[in-house]
Every structure is written in C-alpha cells, then in structure tokens.
C-alpha cells in the first residue's frame, strides 16, 4: 500500500497533538487550505475541536484515505463492487456514538469541511429523529419550548392529520 | 448534577455565521460561556475560543464511556452542543414532509424554518436527488361514483412485489368523473376540473388552490389540452390551456391558448399554437418548457412544439433521425431530459435529448420490446443512463423495465383496482397558496 511518508500534526482545543498522513489530511478542505497557506512544517491548530472529537475525526479521515488509496491501486480491483457498501457499513457503525459526541462530530465536520462526514453524520441524526416526539427531540437538541400551551395547541390543530398514523 | 433547561436564558440556538435564512434565531452563545458550571463529561467545542485550554479545566473524554440513553432523564450525560441554524437545516432537509409538519411544534425557530419557502426549496432539492426515490410517490386516479385518488411510494414498487396504496384526501367535495391529472411539478399536482377550472394541490401538505374560471366558447368537437410547469425565472407555477376547436366545420382546427399563473385572479391569453394541433396528451414539463406532440397537416407529420414558460413563446423542437416505419410518437420526461418514444409496432425506441434544444444531443437509450405505447413515468428529476431501470405505464399496468436484461417486472399494488391514470410526484413542502 502506497503511503505518504509525510505526516502533519494537528492540535486540538485541549492541547493534545494528533498525527495524520497527508492523504488523510486531504479529506478536510480546511486543513488542506491551511497547509497550502502556511506550509506543512508547523503544527496545525484546530482549536474548535476537542480531543475526543478529534480522535474520531482522525479515525474517519484515515479510514477514508485508506479506502481511496486502495481504489486507486489496481484500478479499483482491490475494493471490488462491495467495497462502497462495506465503507458505508463502517460509517454507520462509526457513527453509533452518544448524541453529544455525534453533534460534536457534525460541528467538527462542518468546521473542517469534510463533506462526506458532514453528510453521513447529519443523515445519522435525521434517522435518529424519525419516530421521536417533539418533546424527545427538544431533549436531544437541547431546545427550550418557547410556545405557550395555547400556541402549541393551535399549531397542532392546523396539521392534526400529520400527527396521526396513515 | 442534573442539567436542566430552565436556568440558561432561553437556549434555543446559537446564531451561526453566514446564515442566510430569514428566521429569527436567538443570538446567544453557548450557555457554558455564561459562567454556567460545566458538568462532568463536558466536551463542548466553542466556536469562539481561539487558544487551547489546558487539559486540567476540561475533563478527559470520559463522556464517551457514558452509555447514553436519549429517552431517559440523562442524569449523568451532559446536554448535546447547540447546533447552528445551517446545520439544523441540513439535518431537517433530510426528513419526510409529514414529520416536518409535526416538528413545527418543537419551538418557534424550528416553526419559522420549516415554514420558510426557502427551506421548502432546499428540502425539495434534497428529495429530488435521492438515489433510491425515497421521497417519490405514484398517484393513481380510480374512477367510479366516488372517484378516489390513491398513492404509494415508488421505492416500494421496486423493492417489494406487493404494495399498499393509501387513499388520499382529495380536496374537492364533488368529483366529476371526467376530471383528470394534467401533470406534476415539484410536489404539486395539477388536475383539470371540468368544465373550466384547474386545481393545483400538494397532497403531502394538504394544501390546494383552485384556479379562476377559464372563459371559452364551447363548441362541438372542441377540446382542451393542458400543461403544468414552473416558470423558474420568477419561481411561479403556470397552467397552460390550449383550447382546440373546429373553426369552419371543415376539419380545420384552430387554437386559443391561455395561461394561468398561480396566484393571479384570471387567465391570460397568449399566442396561439404555431404549428398544427396538439395531440391528446398533456404537456411534458422539462427545462422550464412545456412540450406537446402536434399533428401538422401542412407537414403531414408529427412535430414537437415547445413553449418556453418564461418567454411564453414557442419553438419547434428538432427530432432525432429515427428512421422509417414509425407508427406514432409520444413524449416523456426521463431524468431531467425530454424523452421521445417512437413506436414501430413490435418495439418502441426511447431517445433522450441530453441538451435541451440541441438536435445532436438526441441519444438513443434503448428499445422496449413491446407493441404497446407505454407512458414513461420514472425516473423523473434525476440522471438516467442506458442501464437505468424505468417505470412504464402500459394502459393499466405498471412495469419496471430493465434495459440490460430486457425484462419487465410488474409490481402488484393493492387497494387501487381499476386505476386509469398514474403520475409520479415528489413529496415536498411547496405550497400552492401564496
């Protein structure tokens, strides 16, 4: 497996340092941009991401970088038809974390501009929302209900049918 | 300690940077920066912090070891970080319409977001590009004394052999047996209501709008051909009515064309049909135009006439060189391209115009080995290739045709026996009421 000998170091908000290969770093548009602007020798400060989240993001970038490298090798034979499916399954398992961390992953993916991770993690939250009541959703998103009971009742009655089973 | 939601000042959502919504979001920062005691296991990144914190003031990633059960009181887990509006929007745009209507109750800012026409368009874009047609349905009209309209998801006709169609609540009380579907666009269905109205209805949000009366002089042998689409330049939906009448009793037909722009209080007359008379097929909407097959005596052939909905002017579209022996042709929309189906008796050839209006871009996709004149239903709105499966309507049978294996699979759909019309539509939040 062709591996880049170059690695870069990123620093989390907790001050922890993480090493990643160039190929893994390319998964993030922000990191790529920062490296273009400032060069690879310095440590890249990513002070909007804490260590717990950073560790997960590192894992994701490495996995996806390895997958891309394997695709390039042998013209994709190494991956095969099931390869994309397998990666998707890996992504699904990867995102089975508690909500706080999942939300932090979304924020990090947004900040670091890792589109595929942003899409997968937002989809994971969307899938989680299905089947939940508004009250449960308020808990998940840490939202306060600012409707008065009358306002909420009026809103519900406008779309009463939407609250019923088909 | 238990984190309650009362103490911080209305933590609805932090305002994100670069937000482009019209909604009012409370302009607050994370409650933790207001001196709220950080609970154990806090791992909230802060957008505003620029310098690293020493690890002693933040606990280690112990929260990942908590077994978080979202439905319980969560005494041990910290609340999730607040997501900015654009990320909430990203998540919500992936949800089905029915659920989104429920979620309007969550809080005022979610209500504003979900009710915003801008969000409806974002949600539509996401639904349309879904590869598995998760948000597309087929609507059926079942005639009878109490005419019913039913619907079932497109995806389940592919995955399962047997599907249940559910009855939709047709908004008008009286259903004339001669009412029919004109077309669908962005989740809006257009029905022709005899004798002189049209109805634009979004069954997913249960909103509808009836047009004003179309004034025309009914004569013997006259008929109206319609088309429904969107004028993307002003983002308004238009219904076109082509009144075809026999002007002198000799078989020489003329047309009067009127347009109803959703939201207007009357129909407007525009230029008449330039060449020939449209066939008995509703207009097909693609690339901002409505397209009909027309019968031209002066050409003694079938031509394709395209009406640009923005300019409200017509062009004749060039057809591909399809060879001889053609019996008839029908139009369709496959993916986001205009499609022509040429019927040669034992087979039909399907061509698509990859670049609208460009003759050289006509590409023959495949042929369908069938003597029937199938109606091309799906896929709509997204890319199609030579090997894409397509959904056909053959009289009163639906068939998924696989061009690679030349095979047909007929899905069995319950609860809509005797249907005579079918139309694909996407579930959307687009409202016909302005």
Image (spheres, coloured by chain):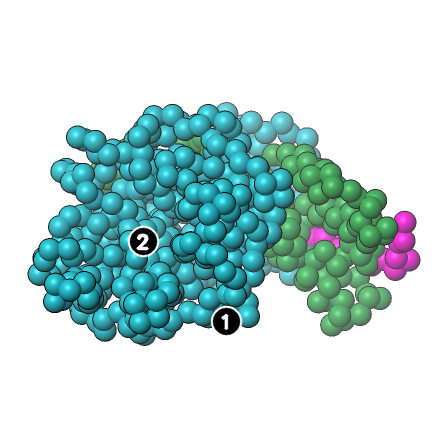
- Name the element at disc 1: loop
Which residue does the image show at 51% across and 47% down from the upper left?
A: B347
Can you say which quadrant of the picture contains the N terminus of chain B? top right
Q: Which chain is cyan?
A: B
> What crowding class fits label 2: few (fewer than 14 Cα within 10 Å), some (14-19), or many (20 or more)?
some
Which residue does the image show at 27% across and 64% down from the upper left?
A: B277
Q: Where is residue B394 drawn, in percent x and y?
A: 41, 40
Indicate which disc residue B358 carries.
1
Q: Is residue B227 left or right of residue A46?
A: left
Residue B140 visible in the snapshot: yes
Q: Is residue B341 left or right of residue A166?
A: right
Q: Is residue B114 magenta?
A: no
Q: Where is residue B53 drawn, in percent x and y?
A: 69, 53
Q: Which residues are magenta?
A: A1-15
> What crowding class fits label 1: few (fewer than 14 Cα within 10 Å), some (14-19), or many (20 or more)?
few
Q: Where is residue B99 drawn, in percent x and y?
A: 39, 38
Q: Which chain is green?
A: A
């Amino acid at each position: 497996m062709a591996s880049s000998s170059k690695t870069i170091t990123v620093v989390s908000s907790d001050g922890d340092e993480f090493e990643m290969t160039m190929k893994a770093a390319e998964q993030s548009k922000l990191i790529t941009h920062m490296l273009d602007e400032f060069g690879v020798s310095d440590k890249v400060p990513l002070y909007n991401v804490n260590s717990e989240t950073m560790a997960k993001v590192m894992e994701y970038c490495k996995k996806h970088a390895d997958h891309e490298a394997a695709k390039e090798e042998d013209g994709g034979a190494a991956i095969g038809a099931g390869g994309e499916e397998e990666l998707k399954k890996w992504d699904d398992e990867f995102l089975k974390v508690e909500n706080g961390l999942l939300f932090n992953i979304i924020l990090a993916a947004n900040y670091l501009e890792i589109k595929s991770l942003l899409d997968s993690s937002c989809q994971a939250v969307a899938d989680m929302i299905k089947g939940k009541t508004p009250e449960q959703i308020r808990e998940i998103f840490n939202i306060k209900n600012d409707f008065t009971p009358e306002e909420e009742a009026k809103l519900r009655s406008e779309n009463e049918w939407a609250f019923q089973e088909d | 300690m238990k984190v309650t939601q009362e103490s911080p000042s209305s933590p609805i959502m932090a305002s994100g940077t670069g937000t482009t919504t019209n909604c009012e979001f409370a302009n607050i920062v994370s409650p933790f920066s207001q001196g709220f005691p950080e609970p154990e296991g806090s791992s909230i990144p802060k957008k505003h912090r620029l310098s690293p914190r020493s690890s002693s003031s933040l606990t280690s990633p112990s929260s990942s070891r908590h077994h978080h059960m979202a439905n319980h009181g969560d005494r041990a887990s910290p609340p999730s970080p607040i997501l900015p509006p654009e990320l909430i929007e990203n998540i919500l745009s992936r949800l089905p319409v029915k659920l989104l209507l429920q979620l309007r109750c969550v809080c005022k800012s979610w209500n504003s977001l979900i009710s915003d026409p801008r969000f409806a368009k974002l949600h539509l874009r996401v639904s349309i590009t879904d590869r598995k047609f998760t948000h597309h349905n087929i609507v059926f009209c079942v005639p009878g004394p109490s005419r019913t309209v039913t619907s079932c998801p497109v995806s389940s006709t592919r995955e399962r052999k047997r599907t249940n169609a559910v009855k939709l609540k047709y908004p008008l009380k009286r259903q004339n047996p001669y009412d029919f579907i004109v077309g669908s666009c962005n989740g809006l269905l257009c029905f022709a209501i005899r004798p002189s109205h049209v109805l634009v209805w979004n069954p997913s949000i249960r909103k509808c709008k009836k047009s004003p009366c179309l004034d025309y002089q009914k004569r013997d042998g006259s008929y109206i051909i319609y088309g429904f689409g969107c004028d993307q330049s002003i983002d308004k939906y238009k219904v076109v009515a082509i009144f075809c009448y026999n002007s002198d009793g000799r078989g020489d037909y003329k047309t009067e064309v009127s347009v109803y722009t959703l939201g207007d209080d009357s129909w407007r007359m525009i230029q008449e049909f330039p060449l020939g008379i449209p066939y008995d097929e509703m207009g097909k909407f693609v690339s901002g135009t409505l397209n009909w097959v027309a019968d031209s005596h002066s050409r003694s052939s079938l031509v394709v006439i395209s009406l640009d909905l923005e300019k409200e002017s017509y062009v004749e579209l060039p057809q591909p060189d399809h060879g001889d022996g053609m019996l008839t042709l029908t139009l369709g929309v496959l993916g986001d391209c205009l499609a022509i189906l040429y019927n040669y008796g034992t087979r039909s050839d399907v061509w698509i115009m990859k670049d609208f209006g460009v003759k050289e871009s006509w590409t023959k996709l495949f042929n369908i080995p069938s003597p029937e004149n199938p109606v091309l239903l799906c896929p709509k709105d997204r890319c199609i290739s030579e090997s894409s499966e397509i959904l056909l309507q053959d009289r009163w049978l639906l068939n998924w045709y696989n061009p690679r294996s030349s095979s047909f699979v007929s899905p069995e759909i319950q609860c809509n026996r005797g249907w005579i019309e079918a139309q694909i539509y996407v579930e959307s939040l687009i409202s016909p009421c302005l």
